[in-house]
Image (spheres, helix red, strand yellow):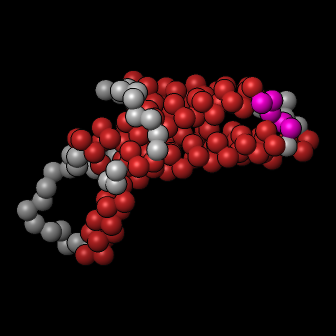
Amino acid sequence: MNLEDLQVYQKAMELADEIWKLTQDWDGEATEIRNQTRQSFDAWAVHLSLGYGQYQSAEKLKHIHECKGQVLVAKTLLQKALSRGFLPLETFEYYQEEIEQYLVRLNNYIKSIHRRGNNAPTRSHRSESYSPKVEEDSALESTFAYRNHEEDGYNTNLDTY
């Protein structure tokens, strides 16, 4: 499967293009929030790409969680755009629903990576550059990366990612 085949990636690209068009007329006082919103939506696909290119699941998950953070940033920026009068309520509600559905897909993608586990080959010996600190950091990162995502409160009924 290629990166471009992932529905979560396709949706990220689609929403980023929609937001780009939506914010074209945001000038003057709205310029800063326009730029931040565009960058945040664009970052979704970028982080998915970075994660997809990683061999070990811990590294994949690190980038996917960064994507999730950017999704939440985008949600906040849209709330700010609404409160400042740059975004109509109907449009805001539409994108809030799109973001919620996207988070479900993203959580499902995260779960699929957990199910596959670490696909890196195990080593029977340590290299000369072995560092116990790096191994501890990876273990700590894995602990946070592998927590139960159903606790996030997102409806996980969508089976696709």
In this view, which residue lies farthest toward the left? 124
Asked if residue 33 lies left or right of residue 28, the reply is: left
Q: Residue 43: image x %, image y %?
A: 57, 42
User: In the rendered view of the protein, which quadrant contains the N terminus?
Assistant: top left
State the image coordinates of residue 54 (x, y, percent, origin top left): 34, 46
Name the residue rendered at 79%, 38% in the picture. Answer: 82
Look at the image and say whether residue 32 sits in the magenta stretch.
no
**Could you tell me what secondary structure mostly forms the magenta stretch?**
loop
Determine the image quadrant of residue 38: top right
Q: Is residue 52 above or below residue 4?
A: below
- The C terminus appears in which quarter of the rendering? top left
Which x, y percent locates residue 50?
44, 44
Q: Tell which of 102 and 10 is nearer to you.
A: 102
Residue positioned 25% across, 75% down in the render: 132
Count all numbered tags in the image, as a single digit: 0
Horizontal placement of 17 versus 90: left or right? Answer: left
Closer to the camera in the image, 6 or 151: 151
Q: Position of residue 15 (x, y in %)?
A: 60, 28
Q: Is residue 152 visible?
A: yes
Which residue is painted at 34% across and 54% down in the image? Answer: 147
- The span picked out in magenta is 85-89
Note whether 144 is above or below 104 in the view shown.
below
Image position of 102 (left or right of 74): left
Asked whether residue 35 appears in the rendered view, the answer is no
Q: Residue at x 81, y 29 (%)?
A: 88
